Image (cartoon, rainbow, N blue to C red):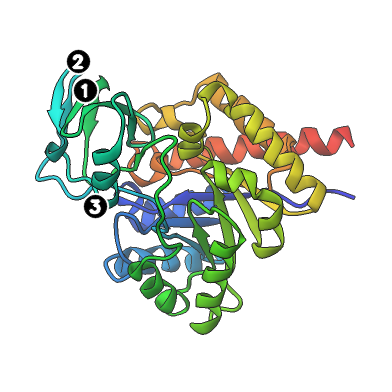
């Protein structure tokens, strides 16, 4: 029996806000879009969502819409302008608008505690309660993620903003909710209860695996969600980067054995954010994700903020279809 086609998703953002661009992406074979609610709200995105839904209607395709909640993820606040952090520089902890829980953790952190910003692109280390050293620098923008490896911070599964988005989800045509940083089945039970209360019983629930707790409780998550998301950005901060491929393989194997769908995301075509063609390594990564049994794959910044959103989707679709052809021929 031939396996079902892998679903292809992009991410909504300024780079693909034009109806013509969205139409081309859908015509290339894109099946749906994600909206990252860590940066915007559903209300703020109403016009963009409508543009996408209208483009899908013109193409005769369903307008699958995945919303990515804030969840227990920690992010810095708003900066007046991006801040350049230079390797070797020492900065005060008040130079960056950290959330209160991070500030509390820093007060008790030993010297040398790592802080990973913007999915690990920037690395800081504590020198004292009020002083940080830039180990790996870069340009830091507003609302970027912050993680303290090895530090446990207790945060609720759903923020008040998340609950409001869940209440509005059905009215905006949301077809799936992505819960980030899932730690155990209780997180998913809370999201499903909120969806049911809001009349969203038919909305799918996707569990993002991004931390060690999610990995440790993976099997108990499977009955509580419709799909597992191997979210390699923050997952690559939670484990040594060189171990990430093995972790991805392990999650995929558990999902296959249980018959649970899984999605692979993050940096699938990262080079295409600024280049018209992908690297050979990227297309191999996509191909192998399909052979591992992925039910869906997704682009993030490549379509939301990249220079070549249509081309990125084209390469993703063509590589996935080539992998499906190969897979089906080998059965």
Would residue 90 be visible to someone looking at this image? yes
Comes first in the chain, label 1 or label 3:
3
Q: Residue at x 41, y 40 (%)?
A: 151
Q: Label 1, on which residue?
A: 133
Please give the label number shown on residue 293. Answer: none
Report the mark closest to the observer, 3 or 2.
3
| Residue occupying the point 42% across, 79% down | 167
Q: Is residue 330 left or right of residue 208?
A: right
* Cβ–Cβ under 8 Å for marks 3 and 2: no
Q: Secondary structure at mark 2?
A: loop
Q: Residues within 10 Å of mark 2 (few under 14, many from 20)?
A: few
Q: CA distance from mark 3 to mark 2?
A: 26 Å
Q: Foreground residue, 314 or 99?
A: 99
Q: Is residue 297 visible?
A: no
Above or below residue 219? Residue 135 is above
Question: Residue 221's spot in the image, x, y percent?
Answer: 66, 57
**Whole-Å distance between the Cαs marked 1 and 3?**
20 Å
Query: With respect to residue 134, does 101 lie above or below?
Result: below
Query: Could you tell me which residue is drawn at 24 percent across and 40 percent down?
Result: 107
- Say what secondary structure mark 3 lies in: helix
* Contact flag, marks 1 and 3 (Cβ < 8 Å): no
Disc 1 + disc 2, Cβ < 8 Å? yes
Percent of width and height locating residue 219: 71, 51
Question: In the rendered view of the protein, which quadrant contains the C terminus?
Answer: top right
Residue 100: which disc? 3
Q: Residues within 10 Å of mark 1 (few under 14, many from 20)?
A: many
Q: Is residue 152 left or right of residue 84?
A: right
The spot of residue 227 in percent (x, y) is: 64, 56
Mark 1 residue element: strand
Task: Give 1 or 127, whichever is nearer the viewer.
Answer: 127
Q: Which of the labelled discs sits on residue 88, or is there none?
A: 2
């Amino acid at each position: 029996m031939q396996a079902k086609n892998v679903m292809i998703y992009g991410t909504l953002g300024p780079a693909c806000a034009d109806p013509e661009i969205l139409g081309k992406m859908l015509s290339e074979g894109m099946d749906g879009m994600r909206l990252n609610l860590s940066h915007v709200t559903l209300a703020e995105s109403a016009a963009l969502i409508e543009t996408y839904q209208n483009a899908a209607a013109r193409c005769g395709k369903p307008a699958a819409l995945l919303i990515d909640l804030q969840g227990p993820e920690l992010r810095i606040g708003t900066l007046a302008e991006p801040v350049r952090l230079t390797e070797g520089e020492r900065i005060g902890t008040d130079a960056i608008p950290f959330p209160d829980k991070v500030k509390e953790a820093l007060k008790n952190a030993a010297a040398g505690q790592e802080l990973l910003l913007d999915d690990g692109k920037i690395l800081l280390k504590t020198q004292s309660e009020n002083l940080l050293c830039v180990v790996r620098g870069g340009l830091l923008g507003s609302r970027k993620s912050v993680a303290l490896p090895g530090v446990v911070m207790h945060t609720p599964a759903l923020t008040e903003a998340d609950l409001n988005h869940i209440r509005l989800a059905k009215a905006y045509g949301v077809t799936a909710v992505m819960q980030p940083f899932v730690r155990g089945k209780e997180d998913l039970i809370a999201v499903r209860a909120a969806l049911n209360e809001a009349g969203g019983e038919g909305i799918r629930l996707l569990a993002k695996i991004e931390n060690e707790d999610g990995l440790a409780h993976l099997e108990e998550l499977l009955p509580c969600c419709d799909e597992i998301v191997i979210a390699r950005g923050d997952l690559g901060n939670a484990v040594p980067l060189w171990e990430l491929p093995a972790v991805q393989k392990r999650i995929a194997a558990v999902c296959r054995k249980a018959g649970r769908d899984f999605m692979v995301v993050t940096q699938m075509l990262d080079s295409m954010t600024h280049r018209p063609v992908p690297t050979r390594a990227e297309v191999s990564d996509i191909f192998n994700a399909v052979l591992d049994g992925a039910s869906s794959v997704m682009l993030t910044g490549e379509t939301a903020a990249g220079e070549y959103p249509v081309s990125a989707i084209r390469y993703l679709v063509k590589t996935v279809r080539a992998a499906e052809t190969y897979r089906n021929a080998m059965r």
